[in-house]
Amino acid sequence: MKSMINFKNQKKYSYPFDYLVIDDCFDTETLDKLLDEWPSDKLAYAGSVMGGRRQISNTGAEQAALGWMGQSAPTWKSFYDYLNTDEMMNKFKKEFQPSLDTWGCTLEEDDSIFGLKMFLHVDWSEAGDGYVREIHADSQKRFVNFLIFFNDKQWDGGDFVIHSSDNIEEFPAPGGNYVKHYTENDAPIHEVVQAKKNRAIFFLSSPNSLHSVSKQENTKEYRKFIYGAYSRRDKMRPVFSNYTNTLKK
Ligand SMILES: [Fe+2]
């Protein structure tokens, strides 16, 4: 299948954790179609979660996004099908291979999407005033997370922030859905990746992948984005097994 993401544009970073930033993620024609099919009306009905962000997703009881894509969003359906493959997940495995070793990745050959051990989550979101995410690493079932932005900033804040964990010796031991929050003392800001139309960020969900979203204010147009992750279905089995910060300086 033709690559829908322009991976040739990717900039790869391995500090403080592994991430890719891809500008001009989609070609213009695809981007226009995705924007055209953007589910504004569906999101207007969706409830607000995480303070100021409304979303529909392909997972959860409703799986609302599946019906929407199947009936009225063929370009999104193609993109979703393109992402929802072991081929794509394995591409990230290769991309981030050295860090999989560092963090004791527990994924094995049969941890596949085809074998139903892994799954792709995607949500289509619009954020407004008050949207903010504290400094955290995502839950232990996650392998790779991503964000793609669909409009240029018509608001203040609302950026994706990458934090360094040089001062942290031990990350919290995995346990269910517990998510530890950090302060900027523990985890200083390393880089602010601004929200920008057609920009994607993919990152390894390693124990040190501390990130946050700065508080969004003065919103003139909702921040449109998708957030997604490749995860293990068995959420009690952590994807990474090393929680000691061997990279500590
Ligand atoms: Fe997160």
Image: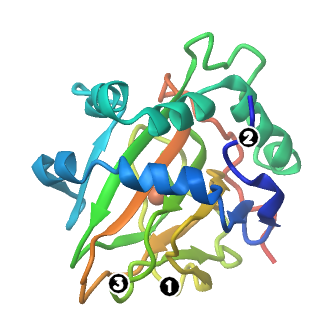
Q: Within 10 Å of the Cα at label 2, are there few (<14), some (14-19), or many (20+) other Cα atoms? A: few
User: Which residue is label 3 attached to?
Assistant: 154
Residue sitting at x 62%, y 61%:
201
Q: Of the residues shown, which amino acid type is indicated by label 2?
A: Ser
Tell me if 134 is positioned left or right of 75 in this view.
left
User: Which residue is label 1 attached to?
Assistant: 184
Quadrant in which residue 117 is drawn? top right
User: Which residue is label 2 attached to?
Assistant: 3
Residue sitting at x 54%, y 32%:
78
Q: Earlier in the sequence, mark 3 or mark 2?
A: 2
Q: Of the residues shown, which amino acid type is indicated by label 1?
A: Glu
Q: Of the residues shown, which amino acid type is indicated by label 3?
A: Gln
Tell me if 50 is positioned left or right of 35 in this view.
left
Respond yes or no on whether mark 1 lies under 8 Å from ligand 1.
no
Q: Is residue 184 placed above or below 162 in the rendered structure?
A: below
Which is nearer the eye, 192 or 11?
Answer: 11
Q: CA distance from mark 3 to mark 1?
A: 26 Å
What label sits on residue 206 in the rendered view? none
Q: SS of the residue at dot 3?
A: loop
**Which circle, 2 or 1, is nearer the viewer?**
2
Q: Within 10 Å of the Cα at label 3, are there few (<14), some (14-19), or many (20+) other Cα atoms? A: some
Quadrant in which residue 110 is drawn? top right
Tell me if 227 is positioned left or right of 92 in this view.
left
Q: Residue furthest front?
A: 29
Tell me if 32 is positioned left or right of 53 in this view.
right
Disc 2 vs disc 1: Cβ atoms closer than 8 Å? Answer: no
Q: Within 10 Å of the Cα at label 1, are there few (<14), some (14-19), or many (20+) other Cα atoms? A: few
Q: SS of the residue at dot 1?
A: loop
- Residue 247 location, x and y as percent? 81, 66
Quadrant in which residue 232 is drawn? top right
Q: Earlier in the sequence, mark 2 or mark 1?
A: 2
Q: CA distance from mark 2 to mark 1?
A: 38 Å
